Amino acid sequence: MTLHGRAGLLIAGLFLASACAAPTPSDHLARVQAAGKLVAFTDPAYPPQSSLNDQTGEYEGFDIDVTHEIARRLGVPTVEFATPDFDQMQAGNWAGRYDIAVGSVTVTESRKAVLDFTQVYYFTPAQLATHPDSGITTVEGFAGETICVGEGTTYFDWLEGTLTLPPEAGEVADPPEGATATALRTDTDCAESWQSGRREFDGWLSAQPTVQQTVDADFPVIFVGDPVFFEPLAVAFDKSVADNDGLVGEVDRIIGEMHADGTLTELSEKWYEGLDLTKRE
């Protein structure tokens, strides 16, 4: 075979190899769709938003259903859930461990520095509670008291006086004068401490549905006063991912579509005992 013949075969072989190679997805959205899998953060310590069903071994709840619907509308058949601590998620720099966080993440100015957000998909009232023996019956009654919250939550920020919410959150009440925060790993650990007989604190601040679930489970918890603020909750993404714009924009569009066609209202009423939390009320 001549030199030119061998060169021609080499060029043809390179062209064929190039044609058969799978194209590299151009951005995060394309990579997710090419993989056919969406990896999503969730925190299963917060029913009815998210919890692990011991009988089925599957995650369930409002956020879980919203995640599956987002994946379906993205054309992605598989959802895989990741459950790191909430603090790790909200710190950003996820290092590719998950693509998206549908974990009832409140939009705050400080989080915007490391996370990208969609439009709000629902609101939750922030509710103060106490144990029946405290004698506290009003929000003002927590003045000078210790209030338990989950680590890294907006409830901690509110008590510390550092909470800054976007305008769609509406009015935010002032914390009780002199009240201080103590943080446990999750919000529900506060109620479990009371159930075990501990009384290091007399207050608990959490999402109203979480407090209601605790009451329904016959824990020694009672509501105190009206909600002190409403959390605007959105889907979050790691801001450090340089090619995230397509995924953020498409999920934002899907959230708008789910508002418009009633899907979010239907899911809220399913998981929150008939309440439509997609509107701040």
Image (cartoon, grey):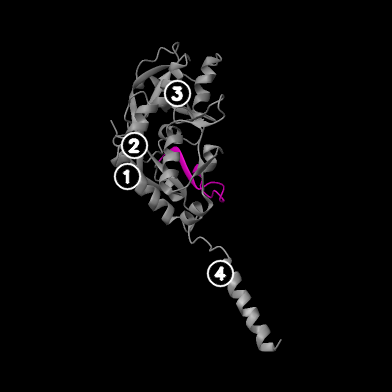
* Among the 4 quarters of the image, the one containing residue 255: top left
Give the CA separation, mark 4 to mark 2: 42 Å
Residue denoted by label 3? 204
Left or right of 15 in this view: 102: left
Name the N-terminal-most of marks 3 and 2: 3
Q: CA distance from mark 4 to mark 3?
A: 61 Å
Under mark 4, the amino acid is Ala
Residue 263's tag is 2
Which residue is at the front of the view, 134 or 210? 210
Contact (Cβ within 8 Å) of mark 4 with mark 3: no
Q: CA distance from mark 1 to mark 4?
A: 38 Å
Disc on the earlier residue, 4 or 3: 4
Q: Nearer the viewer, residue 202 or 169?
A: 169
The amino acid pointed to by label 3 is: Trp
Left or right side of 167 for 69: right
From which residue to which does the magenta span run? Answer: 90-106
Of residues 278 and 93, the one drawn nearer to the viewer in this rendering: 278
Identified at 43% across, 27% down, the residue is 206
Mark 1 or mark 3, which is nearer to you? 1
